Image: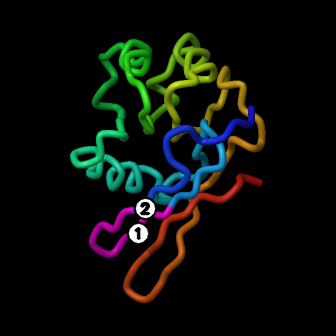
Amino acid sequence: MESKPIVMDHFSTVHTSYVVNFKFTNNITILTGSSATGKTASFSFIKECMAINPDILCLNYLDYQKNIKEIVSHAKGKLIVIDNADILLNDETRKYISLDGKNQYLIIGRNPKNLFATKENLFELVSKKNGEQTEFQIEPYL
């Protein structure tokens, strides 16, 4: 499902020797790929920005006991970043997210089931070494 980002086209932050530099082309971006590529590290760096940017809402395994659908349904105008999406999102929540027109999503996981995703929604994390810094970017998957 292709739709333009409604909260932000670009997100960037610097954390010690890491740079997160994401350009969003869709309202739902599914970040997938192999283990140990930096996906959860990128989530952590974005989560730090949540303290100063009210447009960001981050959820991960620590929120496992919470009602994720209720949390996202009460949000408006947020970039909602969900790490460990494979365990956090049930089918009902996935369907809600796929039709949500008031928030933007960055979903980190391997299973895009029930998100009405197409190849335009699937991305992988790519890291590039620039001197002493490692820059994380997202690129189309496959």
User: Which range of residues does the magenta coloring cover?
Assistant: 13-21
Colour option used? rainbow
Read off the residue under disc 1: 19
The answer to whether 12 appears left or right of 66 in the picture is right
Q: Quadrant of residue 59?
A: top left
Residue at (62% x, 19% y) in the render: 99
Residue shown at 47% from the left, 72% from the top: 135
Q: Amino acid at mark 1?
A: Val
* Label 1 vs label 2, nearer the camera: 2
Q: Quadrant of the rendered structure where residue 137 is? A: bottom right
Left or right of residue 112, residue 65 in this image = left
Marks 1 and 2: CB-CB under 8 Å? yes
Single out the residue that lies furthest toward the left: 51
Against 105, residue 51 (above or below) is below
> Which residue in the protein does label 2 denote?
12
Under mark 2, the amino acid is Ser
Q: Residue at x 52, y 16 (%)?
A: 93
